[in-house]
Image (spheres, rainbow, N blue to C red):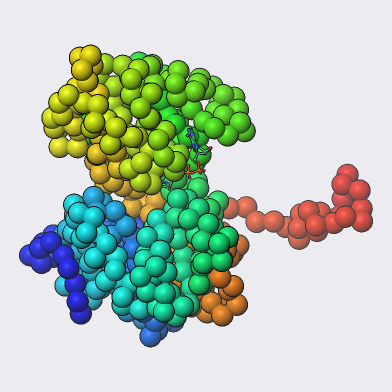
Amino acid sequence: MPYEIADPSLAAAGADRIAWADRAMPVLRRVRERFTADRPLAGLRVGACLHVTAETANLLRTLAAGGADVHLCASNPLSTRDDVAAALALEHGVAVHAVRGADLAGYRRHVGAVAGAAPQLVLDDGCDLVVALHTDHPELARQVLAGCEDTTTGVLRLRAMAGAGALAFGVVALDDTPLRRIADHRHGTGQSTVDGILRATNLLLAGRCVVVAGYGPVGRGIAERMRALGASVVVTEVDPVRALDALLAGYRVLSMAEAAALGDVIVTATGNRDVVAAEHLAVLRDGAVLANAGHFDVEIDVRRLREEAVSVRRVRPAAEEFRFADGRTVVLLAEGRIVNLGAAEGNPPAVMDMAFAEQALTTAWLARNHAALRPGVHAVPADIGPEVARLELDSLGVRLDRLTDAQRRYLSAWETPTWVGA
Ligand SMILES: NC(=O)c1ccc[n+]([C@@H]2O[C@H](COP(=O)([O-])OP(=O)(O)OC[C@H]3O[C@@H](n4cnc5c(N)ncnc54)[C@H](O)[C@@H]3O)[C@@H](O)[C@H]2O)c1
């Protein structure tokens, strides 16, 4: 089995890390038991381009338990855990191509290796594997049965490909499920982004002004936690409904041109580029901290920051200080890449448990239903999210009420007026 990893001697440490995460992933364990018995992926080659973390490792173990031959590359070189990559390659039979901190050429080689393995099912996080298949291996893209995509940014790209008639197979958008938006984007990324900023800086947030750019589920989750820690939170938005939502939740809503001059910490969570751009760099407060939680490192104009700085020095492992000619300094965290993975450990395993259980069940669904899936972007089947939520509540010992027959009839009746009992 081919693999490219940093250091095989890290495999034992990686196995411990994977086992630790597994303790907090009861739902995925239940799915794995089911897969071991039913083998829904028997004989299928799965290509995955995902963050190489302990939680991802437990997803891949689950797919392998379902019978899949799994090939993995990193969707972001900074998030790769080299010990996890080693354990996956040496102890779990996964063809891993991932090295933490790989340069662009290495990143492309790793994605290319997974694309070149001719996957039948594709699990992507940011669409790079799907794009590599279509541009570098169009003949292999045509052989892919179906795929699924983890992030908002990746789904936007897939929709653009589908709109241009360029997408060769059906892809299910995992980012858009109600379960993901709540568990992963809002609570998971909200917490781990604050965790990353704190680990990188050890700042006191109470009484500080924190600017959150973008009030999607990720921005909302960050804003809630920053406020809970005593920060005064400003939100910037381009969508009027989301901006109103933030305003009615009690946040100040300003344009970035106004907010940039106020923020002690500025966090981007938009999925967009140049959200903190040259004109904002010019007005940042002395000592301002810049961090990004959105998918890629284009939200803060890091290139411009480097050009404008008269000096740059690393002040902590995940923090660089830039000094401008006028004497101001600003601190950039994790090089402008996703701070929750660049400076902390990403979402807690308990969150990824739900996201990855949904992903594993969706992958099994794709194996059964790909023939009926036209090229394009599709929703996760409606029954999978509730099934995962039920398993999660079950694992926590939480009981739900159940609809009585009379309630079910009442909710679905239209012949009788709403005030008449069944
Ligand atoms: N760090 C992680 O682990 C993690 C996890 C999940 C999602 N993400 C990423 O975080 C980003 C946000 O995710 P989401 O689910 O909240 O997405 P979303 O699309 O629902 O929300 C993004 C918001 O940003 C706003 N926006 C766009 N351009 C803007 C601009 N120039 N200024 C201000 N606001 C702007 C949009 O109007 C939207 O409301 C995406 O890139 C997603 O891929 C990261």
Q: Quadrant of the C terminus?
A: bottom right
> In which image quadrant can residue 227 be found?
top left
101 vs 365, nearest the viewer: 101
Q: Residue at x 44, y 80 (%)?
A: 143
Residue under the image location 39 percent in, 58 percent down: 125
Residue 80, compared with residue 114, is above or below; it is above
- Quarter of the view holding residue 159: bottom right
In this rendering, position of residue 401 left or right of residue 335: right
Pinpoint residue 360: horizontal percent, then vertical percent. Answer: 43, 67
Find the residue positioned furthest to the bottom: 43
Regarding residue 316, the answer to whether it shows in the image is: yes
Is 378 displayed left or right of 68 in the figure? right
Along the viewing direction, whichever of 275 and 224 lies nearer the viewer: 275
The residue located at (31%, 29%) in the rendering is 290
- Image position, residue 252 (x, y; %): 50, 20
Q: Residue shown at 29%/32% (left/top)?
A: 304
Question: Quadrant where the N terminus lies?
Answer: bottom left
Residue 389 visible: no
Near-viewer residue (165 or 30): 165
